[in-house]
């Protein structure tokens, strides 16, 4: 959404490059993580998820890596395209039920043609 | 947007007036959530529902109430709107309430309280 870009980390890449977006999570009880993409004026869109019993999960052009030791999550986007430009959020479940999620602040990805 | 609509999409209101936002889903998902999104705070959970007439508070529930009288509709009410409730509001749904299930989001409602 608009104005969510204030004070957010930014990443600028050239079309065709690989992008890596990082996220540090805080709750060691979290055992499920999601990456969302949000384009301006739209709701967050699910990209990929990972459970804590995994270190890596791959989707179409995206890979999520999880390092539980340092509570770090990353999203890798291969061959980044201008359509990938958006704000990317990670979310963690805090080990809770009812699917309650806690979201990170987000990273702005800008892809230059 | 996974069969989720929100209404209205934009609203401007005055301080002290009641406001109701509606989330409607066609997915028959049991779990529904209301979030607000603000600069510097990201998405924060206001209230959620784990079934018809079953709701609970999230982290920023003060000043908000919700109701869920049927599976497809989840209403968020600001009893007396304040300027601090100016925000973008998102509804989300999930078909399982386990801690490892993705949520799908609606398009959002931009609310301005003058």
Image (cartoon, coloured by chain):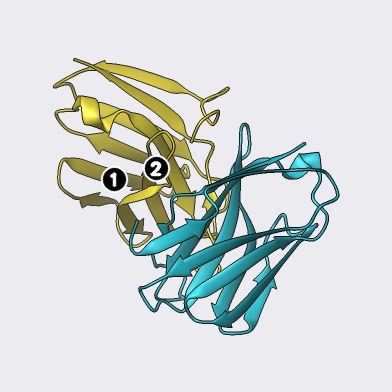
What mark, if any, has residue A13 been given in the picture? none
- Verify CB contact (< 8 Å) between mark 2 and mark 1: yes
Q: Name the residue under label 1.
A: A64
Count the marks: how many?
A: 2
Residue that extends furthest to the right in the rendered view of this protein: B16
Pointer 2 local density, CA inside 10 Å: few below 14, some 14–19, many at least 20: many
> Which residue matches tag 2?
A73
First in sequence: mark 2 vs mark 1 = 1
**Pointer 1: residues within 10 angstroms few (<14), some, or many (20+)?**
many
Q: Is residue A95 visible?
A: no
Above or below for B72 versus B16: below
Q: Is mark 2 on a helix, strand or loop?
A: strand
- Residue A34 position, x and y percent, is 39, 52
Q: x, y (%) of residue A67?
A: 38, 45
Colour used to depict chain A in the structure image: yellow
Mark 2 and mark 1: Cα distance apart in space: 7 Å
Q: Residue at x 57, y 70 (%)?
A: B74
Q: Chain B is drawn in which colour?
A: cyan
Is the residue A60 above or below the residue A8 in the image?
Answer: below
């Amino acid at each position: 959404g608009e104005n969510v870009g204030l004070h957010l980390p930014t990443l600028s890449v050239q079309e065709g490059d690989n992008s890596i977006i990082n996220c540090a999570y805080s709750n060691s009880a979290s055992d499920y993580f999601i990456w969302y993409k949000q384009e301006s004026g739209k709701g967050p869109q699910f990209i990929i998820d990972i459970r804590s019993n995994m270190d890596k999960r791959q989707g179409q052009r995206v890979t999520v890596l999880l390092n539980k030791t340092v509570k770090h999550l990353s999203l890798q986007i291969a061959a980044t395209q201008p359509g990938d430009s958006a704000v990317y959020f990670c979310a963690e479940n805090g080990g809770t039920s009812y699917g309650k999620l806690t979201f990170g602040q987000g990273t702005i990805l800008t892809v230059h043609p | 947007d996974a069969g989720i609509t929100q209404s209205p999409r934009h609203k401007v209101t005055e301080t002290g007036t009641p406001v109701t936002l509606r989330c409607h889903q066609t997915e028959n998902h049991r779990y529904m959530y209301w979030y607000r999104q603000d600069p510097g705070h990201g998405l924060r959970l206001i209230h959620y529902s784990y079934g018809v007439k079953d709701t609970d508070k999230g982290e920023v529930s003060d000043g908000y109430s919700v109701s869920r009288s049927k599976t497809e509709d989840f209403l968020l009410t600001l009893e007396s709107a304040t300027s601090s409730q100016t925000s973008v509001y998102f509804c989300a749904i999930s078909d399982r309430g386990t801690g490892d299930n993705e949520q799908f989001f609606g398009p959002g409602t931009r609310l301005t309280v003058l």
